[in-house]
Image (cartoon, rainbow, N blue to C red):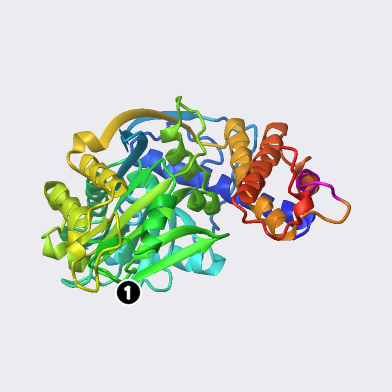
Amino acid sequence: MNYTQNLEFVNSALEKIEKDLIERRRPVLVMLGATPTNVPQGTPGADARPLTHGTGGPAARAGDPPSTNRGSESSQIEKFQWESRRAAVLEEGGIKYYGGVDGSSEVLLFGNAFPAIIQAELDKYREKAVESRKAVPVVLGGVSGRLSAAPRGSVGYSWRFDCGGLSLFLHRSPCDSIPVCKIVLGFHAVDQIEPGALVKWVKNWLGKFKVSIEREHIRRLDLQITAACDMEPYAAAGTSGRYITYQQKKRTDEEAGRVQTITWGNHESPISFKIYDKTTELFNGGDVAKFDAITSRFSEKPGGEWLGHLTRFEFSLTRDFLKKFEINTFEDFEEKRLALVNYLTFNWFRLTQETPDRENKHQSRALTSKIWERVQTMFQRVFVSPLATFARVKKEVSALLTEAKVEQTFLILAGYYSRLLAHSIIKEGPAPGEKSVSETVARFTEAYRDFFPKKAFQRLVKKTLDKVKDFLSEKRARTIPAELLEVPF
């Protein structure tokens, strides 16, 4: 990839980040009742068109295309405040962590169908979305969001409505065995509001369209702990067989000689468990709002920056397993969650001090490792009580992208690209005539000098050199000639 292509790639990444920052925050504010009286120009939802029926809004003109004006830099930036419930940061053995229900969880709602007149309106917007190949901004039941056709793989669902960090898949012809709505919770929703409250909100929203919910099922439930620690000792235990589990199927994913993910089971298993490098996932994801929401928890001061190691421990439970615990709703989960996580972390899976004696079927005699005992405590503390899991916080978010967010975006990108540069330098080594890796780093980063702000560019160079140094000290860079290993850091 040449320098021009690099800049094009960075620009496209920034556009995606800006879109996420602007479009995802606005619906969350609407859900929480923080809609401003005067919506600033360019705010997502300001150009959305309400359905005629059930919302009290004006009908969109038949041939009127959806507006996508995002406003100008001179648009007034309005700020909002609201109370949200975010998982509290706890500490165990000197390691900070938090946890809760993960955003990829799904809930099925069973009830009657949408009225025919509403379905007709939904179909009109669905057709526009198919023609334009992108979601159409609309207001449904007083909530701004984007409507599109349900993607492939969502058999039977006709419409997809994204709002407030939720994805709602709506069915045209529900029955006793087919849900009228599938809720995919999404990170930006469960990070601010309890899952049970989100489901209640969706049920109330459906009620505006005369859809009555008779029952609900949790289809998929992901329980996670995110800890500020390196996953290397856990990866070492997992790859060397020092574990006991009812799910023997294991997969290990590596990148640049480092284990990134260890998974027991798969998406189809009743239970699956994985330990993975959350830092890498956040850097690769490109969602700055998510990156900030997670890493800012571990900062030493409010609004500060934290870029250390993050490790995620995550159990994924399907409907087949949840039925055994008689967990159908989040009310059921609240009552039984401590018993559930105790079963998962003490019986179903644990890391051990030594490799279990599987040949003689004496696995149960293997002692639990100290690092896993710490994880067991983490899960117990997070899921023992709602008071321990959530803490009320005040948060202020701008409806539009501010200069501070732009600067933070560049700093995050600098950290991400430093890793890519370090891998390229380690792989290719210095070019002919270059006396040190420092010269190589300078050459690789030159294309970014004018593009990045000064602070971000300095970080890019420093972090790249630090990462190259780490690789060299761990003897992973064997392709670099010995005479070039003396790097003036």
Q: Which residues are magenta?
A: 434-441
Q: Amino acid at mark 1?
A: Gly
Q: Looking at the image, which residue is at 62% across and 56% down?
A: 476
Please name whichever residue, 346 or 8, is drawn nearer the observer in this view of the structure: 346
| Residue projecting furthest to the top | 301
Asked whether, in this view, residue 212 is left or right of residue 4, the answer is left
Q: Residue 368: x, y in percent?
A: 24, 52
Please name whichever residue, 276 or 293, is drawn nearer the observer in this view of the structure: 276
Q: Looking at the image, which residue is at 50% across and 69% down?
A: 130
**How many numbered marks does the figure carry?**
1
Magenta stretch encompasses residue 200: no
Asked whether, in this view, residue 149 is left or right of residue 340, the answer is right
Residue 275 visible? The answer is no
Q: Looking at the image, which residue is at 48% across and 59% down?
A: 259
Q: Residue 421: x, y in percent?
A: 68, 51
Residue 37 visible? The answer is yes
Asked whether, in this view, residue 352 is left or right of residue 81, the answer is left
Please name whichever residue, 349 or 489, is drawn nearer the observer in this view of the structure: 489
Q: Residue 350: x, y in percent?
A: 25, 56
- Local crowd size for mark 1, using a 10 Å CA cut-off: few (<14), some (14–19), many (≥20): some
Please name whichever residue, 130 or 248, is drawn nearer the observer in this view of the structure: 248
Residue pointed to by mark 1? 156
Q: Residue 338: x, y in percent?
A: 15, 47
